[in-house]
Image (cartoon, helix red, strand yellow):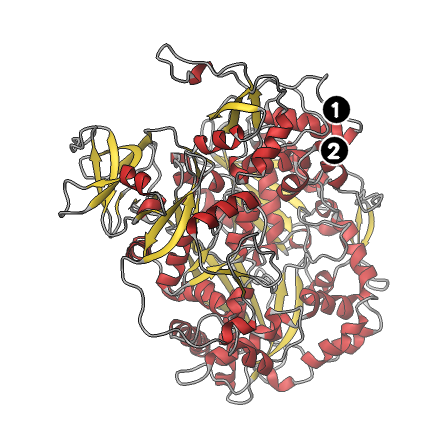
Amino acid sequence: HPAERVRRVLDEAGPVLLIIEPGAVPPVTDVPALVLDEDAWAGPPLPPGGPEPYDVAHVIHTSGSTGTPKGVLVTHAGVAALTSSLVDGVALDAGSRVLQLGPPTFDISVGELCLAFGSGGTLVLPPSGPLVGEDLGAVLTERRISCAFVPPSVLATVPAGPHPWLRALVVGAEACPPDLVARWAVGGRRFHNAYGPTESTVVATLSGPLDAGPTVPPIGSPVAGTTAYVLDERLRPVPAGAGGELYLAGAALARGYLGRAALTAGRFVADPYGPPGSRMYRTGDLVHRDDSGITYYLGRGDEQVKLRGLRIEPGEIAAALVEHPTVVRAVAVVRHDRGTAQLVAYVVPAPGTETDEDALLLHAAERLPAAMVPAAVVVLDALPLSSHGKLDRSALPAPAERTGDTVRLPGSAREEILCGLFAELLDVGQAGADDDFFRLGGDSIMAIQLAARARAAGLVLSPHDVFTVRTPARLAVLARTPDSEGPAEEDTGTGRLPLTPVMHWWREQVTDTSAFTQSMLFPLAPGTGLAAIEAAVAALAERHTALRMRLLRDDDTGWEFDVPVAGAPAGARAVRLAVPADTDLHARATELARTATLRPEDGEMVRALWLDPGPGRPGALVLTVHHLAVDGFSWRVLGQELASALDPRPGHDADAAPASASFTRWSRLLSQEAGLRTDELPWWERQLADPAARLTDGGQPVGHRETYTFELGAELTRSVLVALPAAFNCRPDAVMLTALTAAAVRRRGTGTALLVHLEGHGREVISTEVDVSATVGWFTTQYPVRLDIGAAAVEPGGRPGEALMCVKEQLRAVPSGGLGWGLLRHLHPETGPALAALPTPDVRFNYLGRFTATDAAGGRLLDLGPDAVPLAHTLEVDVLAREENGEPLLEASFSYPSGAFTQDEVRALAGAWSQALGVLADHCGADHGGAVHTPSDFPLVDLTGDQLELLAQDMDFGDLDGFGPAQDDDEEGERR
């Protein structure tokens, strides 16, 4: 807020003390200031006792129609009522993580405090700067937010996504469109619409959990401590369905306005329906109720408006403009000429003066909050009046569009692109190189759109960049391009390429190369023809070099691949297979996939089979790819591109996807990188120095594959995926591996450690010039880790939390996501033999994450049977979070060779793992002091666990939440 507005607020509030942060510049005032440093906390304790319920808890200043902000006196009773109603209404608990999105000067920040502290949960402070669009979506996911209070216009900018931790959303401060409910009220997530002025302590009415529907959602029913009346002009109740003005009464009502007795008397009037002496507040809002008493918002009954969630009195803006010596009269209105709301001011100049728009905007910016500064100022000889002498708003002209004579034309290609995007997005006809985005009518939502359109035009900008520099000229300087770090190496993807580490591992395991395939089933719309399918599959092979690889086998000189120039390989032509109309397409596809073979030596890496049940019927496409060319994340890329290529609507083209580095370039980069990772060798040798950490004493597994598959249950799943990671700031796989280590130690009867092979997605950032985010190939990394839970037992009466912290720290200590192990083991001629001679883990663990059908554009991976992939370990544990009724459910598979264990032994081991997970979950549910931190949570300082424990006695680490590395990546499994 400008210094002048702060001064006015302080003059009216009359505080006896200002509390400021160290380093902050106090406002110019006679009020003494206390710097909140260590000395400030060293004073004597507060005297016993506390405030009375109707004492003032705080003062929030809102926009005032006279030009002076009015301070609302909110009571402790109101805050208490707000807390109980929000916590109960939104169903929060001690595990909730509430985002502090509202600024402290906005009353919704009080509601966020009540949500968090009233439930015993955690208040999460966001990063500084505008928080909208992808940035807000990232915060919701990365900070594991379970509840947020978001204005609808801000929520509309956030891309749709799973947001697995987000259990509840509350919207308010402006009208909520029905499509927003449809987008966000999914997967069991509670979606509430709230309404309330500051004068009734933030929230006066709250809807129940909303479902998608075609109508505008209601604002609900009165919350605890609030009584709501819908009255006509004579203060008589109106019947159900009829419109009236909303009046609010009850314990949540504010005491009035600070030092404004006349204004208080005009808005807080006698309540004819309450006890003697009670009052009610005239909201000025028009509403109606249905037969069940649910309230619906109709609009404002006075001139007060809301713009992007903020309540604005146009009179305050006009009053600020009239203070300028060149203005004698002013009015401010919200216009929608350009498809979005913008604030426009109209002024009448003083006789004999010239009024300058830029000078007036600067004058307003010095006196008003940024949200109340007009986007444009229009100078008029006189304000238009109606026949009754009142302002004729309909006669106010729209702001004039700029012309080439009044703007600076772009002086570079970048400026020309950005000026064109400004004009197109803001609908201003022409934008100059020095035009301010927000003065032309832009807002935070449009800043997101500008960044997206600029990116599509080849200029990389963020919404924050738009907020910071604002003009095409400055944005042109700030913008990056994909090749901004220098000319990129030509990446044709053709020629010879070496095997990657995981391919070397595969070569050591198999003799028959033809059966190592994966297949996915894709639905086809009726009318899809053979030519379209063949063209789509050929386009995939042309785009992705891994689908064109040919295996060159030479047992003397080694194996490698060759990638020919783009052209349809042997398997890219689709084959039509007619099937009866009543065929179970999934069952038939599974049967065919289990017998499918491909010949990589002949360049046959992909094959497409069209199951055609006849004209007018939906068919299916079985896409089979050799595993050498695909992994879980690659299937998502292929699925999305295939769906786009087969979409009959215009404008859908698989080639329109962003460019990504070829798999050929990636494999060559790995070979170069191997020589740079030798400093990791001692770390990997330490992991394998203890053969006693193996699960068994046996050698290579023998016998056919047996698999025991089971589910964990919804409650335990939530603990493993959400509660425990939130409590210990770790990933779900750390929880699962802690339990697996405990189960293995119990079965073995000795030691405290387990040697385990882990899998990673492998798409690590080696070079900023090589982006493989949309590259198809087999990127999986495999690496050994010795996990030691120490003396902390994961059993009733033990110290399971300490065990989890140990495993979390050991996993975070793995260098470069495990990539270096494969490079040194398979690609380095000197370190390879040394690592090959060490003991290897006999347990493999793989958390596949959440991979739903929508991740691959409707495709479904087909089960190829128990012997499709050879067993390389005595025990292989695969865990998948699949969706059931919109909720994740963990499914675990323990696979083993029949000669290594009996079925009862594996069931007992799986039961011990489940039991250990339950013990961890019970520990998390108990009161252990909130979120637990470990040294790796603070990578910028060098701390031991003991030092961290000492610090925790004197400070709240919740203030530092988010300063450590992001820990939860649900996409990690699906990339493998």
Quadrant for the N terminus, please: top right
SS type, badge 1: loop
- Res 788 quadrant in image: bottom right
* Residue at 54% over, 78% down: 900
Q: Is residue 504 above or below residue 596?
A: below
350 displayed left or right of 457: left
How far is the residue under mark 2 from the one under mark 1? 10 Å
Q: Which amino acid does label 2 sit on?
A: Ala
SS type, badge 2: helix
* Residue 21 spot, x, y in % from top left: 56, 62
Residue 449, visible in the rendered structure: no
122 displayed left or right of 624: left
Front in this rendered view, residue 253 or 631 = 253
Q: Do the residues labelled 2 and 1 touch (CB within 8 Å)?
A: yes
Front in this rendered view, residue 826 or 971 = 971
* Residue at 57% over, 52% down: 28
First in residue order: circle 2 vs circle 1: 1
517 displayed left or right of 586: right
* Residue 213 spot, x, y in % from top left: 34, 35
Q: In this view, does 875 lie above or below 313?
A: below
Q: Mark 2 points at which residue?
A: 473
Q: In this view, does 429 lie above or below 805?
A: above
Q: Residue 188 carries which label?
A: none
* Residue 392 spot, x, y in % from top left: 42, 16
Front in this rendered view, residue 350 or 346 = 350
* Residue at 71% over, 32% down: 472
* Residue 355 spot, x, y in % from top left: 61, 22
Q: Which amino acid does label 1 sit on?
A: Arg
Q: Name the residue under label 1.
A: 408
Q: How crowded is mark 2: few (under 14 residues within 10 Å), some or many (20 or more)?
A: many
Residue 932, visible in the rendered structure: yes
Q: Residues within 10 Å of mark 1 (few under 14, many from 20)?
A: some
